[in-house]
Amino acid sequence: MTDKSVSRVALFVSTITSFITPFMGSAVNVALPAIGREFRMGPVALGWIPTIFLLSGSMFLVPFGRIADITGRKRVFLWGIILFSLASALCALAQTETALIAFRFLQGIGGAMIFGTGTAILISCYPPEKRGAVLGVNVAGVYIGLSIGPFVGGLLTHYFGWRSIFLAVVPLGVVAVAAVLWKIKDEWSSREESFDAWGALLYAASLVTLMYGLSLLPHGSALVPLLLGTLLLVAFGAREMEIKEPLVDLRLFRENRSFTFSNLAALINYSATFAVSFLLSLYLQYVKGFSVRTVGIILVSQPIIQALFSPLAGRLSDRIEPRLLASMGMGITALGLCSFIFLSPDSGLLYIVANLVLLGFGFALFSSPNVNAVMSSVDKRLYGVASGTLGTMRLVGQMLSMGITLAVFSAFMKDGAVSSATYRLLVDSARVTFAIMALLCLGGVFASLSRGSIHPETGK
């Protein structure tokens, strides 16, 4: 049994790193116009700044999870924090758009190393009956980072310039590194196993190609990369089924019902919810005319509810079947998304905040129990791969969410800029997107319910 001081440090470090990586991803988005003005970047080049971070993160999450299981999780986790912090500092110092994009790629790799191991280390430090509670705290860090990123990023950009966003996370990285070196022991590894490099290459190539195809939707040119990415993914799956020590043991998906449907539920949840703050930010600033600081205050109502209820939901999932809690959370989220279908230029602030509170509660009730279900469904030696797979579901879901949103906006608004003449089209685009997301969430309820029981002995 791990002593209490090590467990607390593991929770502290895991929560810090769970915050800074999604915070960075969401905070940078509000700074893109300022970056574009400084480097005179066109919209296509500017789009690579957030995209390259998601792409590199999704490419390396599962491979680094496997490497961590083989060589030791502390090592990968520690170097991930160092790389992420160093890349953040380099982004702040970048003098060209090419350098910034390259440093963002490195930052994504560091983020993958963190997410592929942080949850696994945390789980290894706590007994099964306490996992839900600590995962609730950990998940709260993730969602707070994702949700307050645009607000804090806007304030930092307004007062100190866009480079301050990258510099702001460096001190947190230094603290995390010091804490890891101080207390965390590297006792979780199986060095006799090998690493499937060819599988990792196929995996990365398939994700990059698929995500590139998603970025081209709804244009017909998306068909070729989507088809190629699918073929590469099939080839990856065929290889993993044949080799003795695969990058991802696909038997987990074939034979482990809970693992499969819990990850599917996570993918659907992120696909249905990630673009909510993006849509509301546009609506509140353009249609309602609020300032970026006011919009940030409005949107923060969602992460406050998530932060309050995620630990509670985690503790409940130690006693009540996670699939029931997570499914209830997904249903509440679907209800909140359905309410936003009726958004109009005249919608009141109370209506918007009430829906955000409902979404925040749904997110909290889903996330912690779902993570608990994923990690509790595998053996200890597979925690790294399980954590990496769940992180990949998050990144792929985020890309799919934005892909759906941009496809709808393209269909309604074509390539035109947002102006008073197109406000109605913007609202219509948002309403259609919310409708699609609500349908996704409803489908996710069934995926969540299909996972089976984690606590069969309780009968709950």
Image (spheres, rainbow, N blue to C red):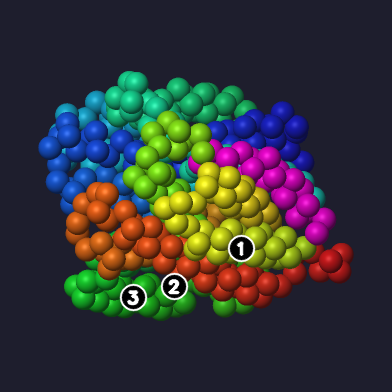
Quick check: 75 left or right of 26?
A: right
Type of amino acid under label 3: Thr
For marks 1 and 3 on the same chain, the one whose residue lies earlier in the sequence: 3
Q: Nearer the viewer, mark 2 or mark 3?
A: 3
For mark 3, what is the residue? Answer: 230
Q: Residue at x 57, y 77 (%)?
A: 254
Q: Secondary structure at mark 3?
A: helix
Extreme-front residue of the structure: 346
User: How would you rate the neighbour count of disc 2 (Cα within 10 Å): few for under 14, some for 14-19, many for 20 or more?
Assistant: many
Q: How far is disc 2 from disc 1 in space, using C-alphas?
A: 39 Å
In this rendering, position of residue 382 left or right of residue 2: left
Q: Nearer the viewer, mark 2 or mark 1?
A: 1
In the rendered view, tell whether residue 180 sits above or below residue 30. Answer: above
Q: Is residue 245 visible?
A: no
Is disc 1 surrounded by few (<14), some (14 to 19) or many (20+) residues within 10 Å? some
Check if mark 1's residue and mark 3's residue have beta carbons within 8 Å: no
Query: Residue shown at 23%/42% (left/top)?
Result: 101
Residue beneath disc 1: 335
Front residue of 333 and 431: 431
Give percent across and percent down for residue 222: 24, 72
Q: Is residue 166 above or below residue 216?
A: above
Distance (Cα) linking label 2 and label 3:
15 Å
Q: Bounds of the magenta span?
A: 299-320
Determine whether, in the image, residue 323 is placed left or right of residue 243: right
Report the mark closest to the observer, 1 or 3: 1
Dot 3 surroundings within 10 Å: few (below 14), some, or many (20 or more)? some
Residue type indicated by callout 1 = Leu
User: What residue is shown at x 72% (from left), y 28% (from top)?
Assistant: 5
* Quadrant including the C terminus: bottom right
Q: Secondary structure at mark 2?
A: helix
Q: Which residue is mark 2?
A: 240
